[in-house]
Image (cartoon, rainbow, N blue to C red):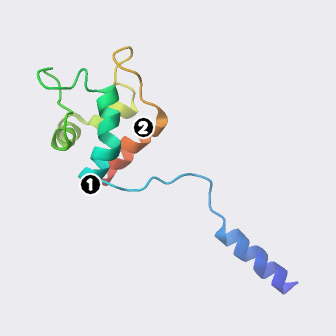
Amino acid sequence: MIIRLAFFLLVLISCTYNEIEPICNPDPIFYNDIIKPILDDHCSDCHSDGSGRALLSNYNQVISAQNEHDLLDRVINFEMPPYGAQPSLNQSDILKIRNWIDCE
């Protein structure tokens, strides 16, 4: 009986909540491999050189956009990309951007 109870407690303790925790990777390599392709697909038409908007073409520009224009809040609140301008971001892409910026 005690062995079964101990085994049950061990199994219960080893169980985790079924939620995916994003991995914190704030470095430029994660940006180049994961974040830049998302921004290229969804943001580059409006946020490239000569657009007059916050530039999002490279790592430093994205960090600057976050610091000066609160990029993450605009993405999370679905302000960017605006409806109809680009394909909208899916929740997975938003989570990747959020995680990357939160790690900075």
Task: Residue 47 in the image: state x and y as whole percent.
Answer: 21, 25
Foreground pick, 44 / 104: 44
Q: Earlier in the sequence, mark 1 or mark 2?
A: 1
Give the vertical position of 17 relative to 99 (above or below).
below
Which residue shows up at 19% across the image and 34% down it? Answer: 57
* Residue 21 shows in the view: yes
Badge 2: residue crowd in 10 Å (few <14, some 14–19, many ≥20): some
Task: Residue 59 in the image: state x and y as whole percent.
Answer: 20, 43
Badge 1: residue crowd in 10 Å (few <14, some 14–19, many ≥20): few
Judge from the rendering whether residue 81 lies leftward or rightward of residue 6; answer left or right: left
On the rendered image, what quadrant is the N terminus found in? bottom right
Picture quadrant where residue 50 is located:
top left
Task: Residue 21 in the image: state x and y as whole percent.
Answer: 49, 54
According to the picture, the residue beneath numbered tag 1 turns out to be 27
Which residue shows up at 40% across the image and 21% down it? Answer: 87
Which residue shows up at 17% across the image and 24% down it? Answer: 53
* Residue 72 shows in the view: no
Which residue shows up at 62% across the image and 62% down it? Answer: 16
> Looking at this rendering, what residue extends furthest in the bottom direction?
2
> Looking at this rendering, what residue extends furthest in the top direction?
84
Judge from the rendering whether residue 5 lies leftward or rightward of residue 75; answer left or right: right
Q: Callout 2: helix, strand or loop?
A: helix
According to the picture, the residue beneath numbered tag 2 turns out to be 93
Foreground pick, 70 / 101: 101
Q: Callout 1: helix, strand or loop?
A: loop
The amino acid on which the numbered mark 2 sits, given as a three-letter code, is: Asp
Judge from the rendering whether residue 5 lies leftward or rightward of residue 101; answer left or right: right
Give the vertical position of 7 relative to 18 (above or below).
below
Q: Circles 1 and 2: CB distance less than 8 Å? A: no
Task: Residue 41 in the image: state x and y as whole percent.
Answer: 34, 28
Between marks 1 and 2, how big is the CA–CA gap? 17 Å
